[in-house]
Image (spheres, rainbow, N blue to C red):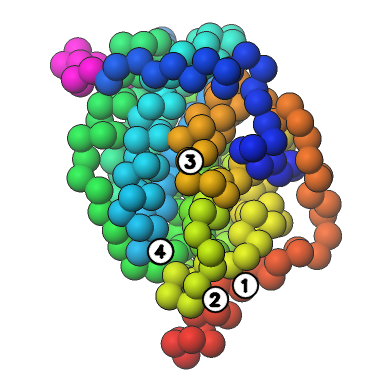
Amino acid sequence: MRWCVSIGAVLVAGAIAGGDVAGVAAPNPNFQRADAKEATVDVELVLAVDVSYSMDMDELAIQREGYAQAIVSKDFLQALKTGPHGKIAVTYFEWAASTDQKIIIPWRVIDGPETADAVAAEIMKTPIRRASRTSISGAINFAMPLFEENPYHGLRRVIDISGDGPNNNGSPVTLARDTALEKGIIINGLPIMVKEPSFSTMDIENLDLYYEDCVIGGPGSFVVTIKDREKFKEAIRTKLILEVAGRTPKRRIVPVADKEPRVSCMIGEKIWSDRWGR
């Protein structure tokens, strides 16, 4: 079953109230991957972050800061302790077109404040960039092999996709999603809806429904929607806490039924074709 929740409608029990953020330290020179005997983690988490031109520079900066601050927050570190192993493996990449994906953070283990600080520092030191087109399918297809290439064994495998528009490049998003689900991978979504839809940005009104019906999938998969710029960082923190703890939002909104999508899963491709004829 899949669920959708607005950031304004959910509070993770005991997790969001504090919201304290630890200082981001310089990268630890002794920060290394786990060896073979330490390779089992609670979750292998791929953070796939949209950097398409429809995202303005302020949004990109807030998004980057949101992930870094979430990872070092008390709430996140507390959620980390709830797993049987108390550690996760994470990688972070940025995406735009179907052939444009850039790994910012290779696979790293987070098992406490020190490693969390190191990952957050790596995220923040990378220059912000923007690129053309939006290929959610390309992001999913790029993410899938990353699970096979890392040395870790997670009890769950999760792709966390953030984005502010529908797929308009590459293969249909449902094909990529279904392939990931066949491999036992869970996909969660963070649709960003802080701007009014406009001709220039390819935004759509019901991006949250599009993510529910066309993007996410797998046991316990969910969407956290960002509709208020001021809630951006809180939404990212909420989503990461839920993913690390292996939970769905406490307040379940409308379950997504296996029926005809409420928003066409090819809407982005159609809009692009109607406007530019290709």
Q: Secondary structure at mark 1?
A: loop
Question: What is the three-letter code of the residue carrying label 1?
Answer: Met
Magenta span: predominant SS is loop
Q: Nearer the viewer, residue 62 or 28?
A: 62
**Spot occupied by residue 274 in the image (x, y as percentages of width and height):** 53, 87
Residue drawn 71% across the image and 44% down it? 4
The label number, if any, that marks residue 269 in the structure image: 2
| For the residues bearing labels 2 and 1, Cβ distance under 8 angstroms | yes
Residue receiving disc 4? 54
Query: How far apart are the alpha carbons under marks 4 and 3?
Result: 18 Å
If you read the primary sequence from the N terminus, does the residue marked by circle 2 or circle 3 appear first? 3
**Spot occupied by residue 129 in the image (x, y as percentages of width and height):** 25, 54
* Highlighted magenta segment, given as a residue range: 25-33
Disc 2 or disc 3, which is closer to the eye? 3
Disc 1 or disc 3, which is closer to the eye? 3
Q: Please check the rendered image and state whether residue 137 is part of the magenta-colored stretch, yes or no.
A: no
**Mark 4 burial class by Cα count in 10 Å: few <14, some 14-19, many 20+:** many
